[in-house]
Amino acid sequence: MADCGTSFVFILVTIVFMSMTPTSTCNKLTDTEIKHLCSKTSNVGGCYKLLKSDPRTANVDARGLAKVSVDLASNKANKTHSLLNSFVNATHDSRLKNIYKLCSSNYNDAIRDLKAIKNYLHSGAYKNIPSQVKDASEEIKQCKKVYGGANSDRAHIKKKNQEFELLISIVEVTSDNLNKN
């Protein structure tokens, strides 16, 4: 009789545990679900291509996809930030140097925002992510505004800003998906 009681308790504990665990963050996302999330961005095909190009997306849940999107955005921001810094050091045009410095500062702040998002994902504090996403997005809008005054675009910053904006929109969509659960 003790075996039946033990089995019953085990089953009950398992059911309670499973009911407390959000299903969307435990199940592997399908291609259809990833495409659906990408449909909420400004560039469905670009979003899907970026996410699927990362081998980690083959077996991720919703939280894992959000982490991948933050990693992709962080990598792009770090590369652009480094590029801007190299152009600050290489140019002798004071006006252009100032533009590069301002955009570099914007990217530095966006990197800080992405680190905060990563920490919120790790801790499960998903409700704090939208404000950080908004801040990172605003940083790039400021860079675009400042960079609009540049006569040349040897660093291809306009394109890099567009790519980063897409990545931030992917972070927004994947993190919003976590907040709905």
Image (cartoon, rainbow, N blue to C red):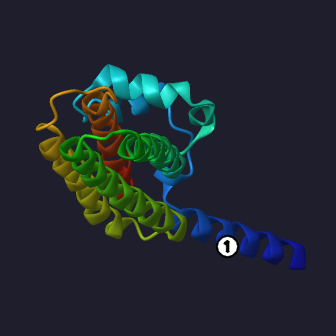
- In the drawing, does residue 150 fall left or right of residue 170? left
Instruction: Indicate the quadrant where residue 180 lies.
Output: bottom left
- For residue 177, above or below residue 52: below
Work out which quarter of the rendered image holds the C terminus and state it. bottom left
- In the drawing, does residue 142 fall left or right of residue 180? left
Residue 45, position in %: x, y? 34, 20
- For residue 75, above or below residue 32: below
Residue bearing mark 1: 13
Callout 1 environment at 10 Å: few (<14), some (14 to 19), or many (20+)? few
Who is closer to the viewer here, 75 or 151? Answer: 151
Work out which quarter of the rendered image holds the N terminus and state it. bottom right
Label 1: element kind: helix
Who is closer to the viewer here, 170 or 100? Answer: 100
Is residue 1 in view from this perspective? no
What residue is drawn where x is 52% and y is 64%? 19
What residue is drawn where x is 15% and y is 46%? 146
Is residue 98 in view from this perspective? yes
- For residue 118, above or below residue 93: below
Residue 42, position in %: x, y? 22, 30
What residue is drawn where x is 34% and y is 30%? 155
